Amino acid sequence: MGLVAAFFLSESGYRVTIIDEHNCPKPKSVSSENEICCRGTTLDGCDARHASITETMPHAVFYRIDSLRKYPLDRGGWRIIRDQFNNQELVWIDRFSELAGYPELVVNLFNRFVSNINRRGIELWEEMSKVYSQIIQDTIKNRRIIKICSLSNPIRTVALYQAKYHRSEENLLMLSRSQVLEKIPGLVLRDGDAAGIEVPGFTINHLKLCQNMIEFLEKNPNVKFKWSTQVCSIDDISSSKIIFASSLNRLDSPLLNNVSLAVQGVLGCWTKLPNVHLIKNGFKIAEKEPIGVINVTPSYDEQHLYATGCFAFCGQRGIVQSLYLDQLIELFYSTIRSYLPDEIDANESEILPTKFCIRPMTPDGMPIIAQLTADNNRQQVYFIGGTNAGGFVQSPVLATILLDLIQGSKSDTNLRHIYRSLRLDRNTLLFN
């Protein structure tokens, strides 16, 4: 999110300084693959993203109304924190559960809104790929994504859901069980009624994308990077405009207190597997909670597969080591093994570990754009984030809205009107 915001601002003529507390990422670092990632989902984490119209739809759905208070083996709960929740976590959990109790609100309002953001995000990425081809070079693999359907998630239900958010000309393609297995060699589908639906979108190996973007920005005289630099206070920054684009708020500032309430972390698991059968297509499998949806994405050279999944609430605590996290990891691996047994068996010989990322999530499932004024009245502060793991597909939309806000744009083509729905003080994020 931060890199894309810097890109949009610098291309519009603004001088931008990017401050990051971590070292500059090194491309294809072997050692980094065996470390627990601390950068969040952008510069560490799984080297794979899916971009589709129905990506990262709001998670507060009716069957998750009690999920955050149950453990993984207790009917699919999201809880891995052993001790009591703190006050910040409790207000977030209560709001999530409250919204899950109003499925008509989530389905008819939030889902439609998020799918429209995703659609515009995909359009903006496509436009960027034409004008700035060097940024997208060697990153996009598939132009269609396959969604696997089973008896518990039948093709008819999935097709009706997808048709609700896609246009007729977008060519949703129904796949029989045999067609799915032909497109995804080595996949095991034990359900005889399994089928699939192919939807528009694309998969991207985003670590290469980030590296391309960093190299592009480094050549711009208006852009400066400050790596390995920690900001303890807004007063440490001399700029008149400050943009926070971090996943979770770790800055001790009363100005961002409401951000800490609105954005909490939800842990996900991922692993890198040998691509034994040279699978070329990215695909999704809807699974029981707390696995949720498994995304499988080939690496750009097709030598590996990235598999992601799971939901585990961790608030602002980061990775919570506990018995319940161990249970979640075991469940994650056993689920992947049921679909990709050859890849898991080959993986055990390579010893590629399970890793984690922390998704910045809001209770209502929509991202946040906050426009704040610092206590010194000299600085305008902005926060963009809470993208519910939709950081890739939604980032150009949020960056465009941010640019419109800073420029005070009132043209008919700007996206500033969306800002009212994404404000930090919207009704669904009022916790008092």
Image (cartoon, rainbow, N blue to C red):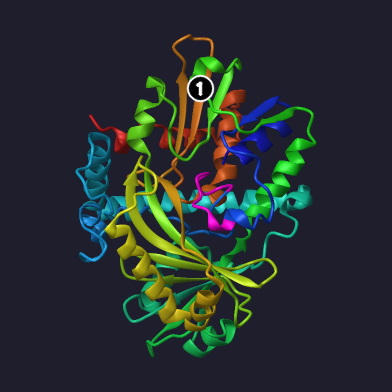
- On screen, residue 336 above or below 119: below
Reading the image, the residue beneath label 1 is 381
Question: Can residue 388 be seen?
Answer: no
**Mark 1 residue type:** Val
Is 310 left or right of 401, judged from the image as shown? left
Magenta span dominant secondary structure: loop
Whether 42 is among the magenta residues is yes
Front-lying residue, 417 or 35: 35
Q: Quadrant of the C terminus?
A: top left
Front-lying residue, 286 or 336: 336
Whole-percent x and y of residue 424? Answer: 39, 31
Picture quadrant of residue 372: top left
Is 17 left or right of 36, judged from the image as shown? right
Picture quadrant of residue 300: bottom right
- On screen, residue 237 above or below 62: above
Front-lying residue, 321 or 401: 321
Per the image, label 1 sits on a secondary structure element best described as strand
Q: Residues within 10 Å of mark 1 (few under 14, many from 20)?
A: some
Whole-percent x and y of residue 37? Answer: 51, 50
Whole-percent x and y of residue 40? Answer: 50, 46
Residue at the image position 50 percent from the left and 45 percent from the top: 38
Residue at the image position 52 percent from the left and 52 percent from the top: 118
Residues drawn in magenta? 33-43
- On screen, residue 161 above or below 30: below
Is 276 left or right of 250, judged from the image as shown? right
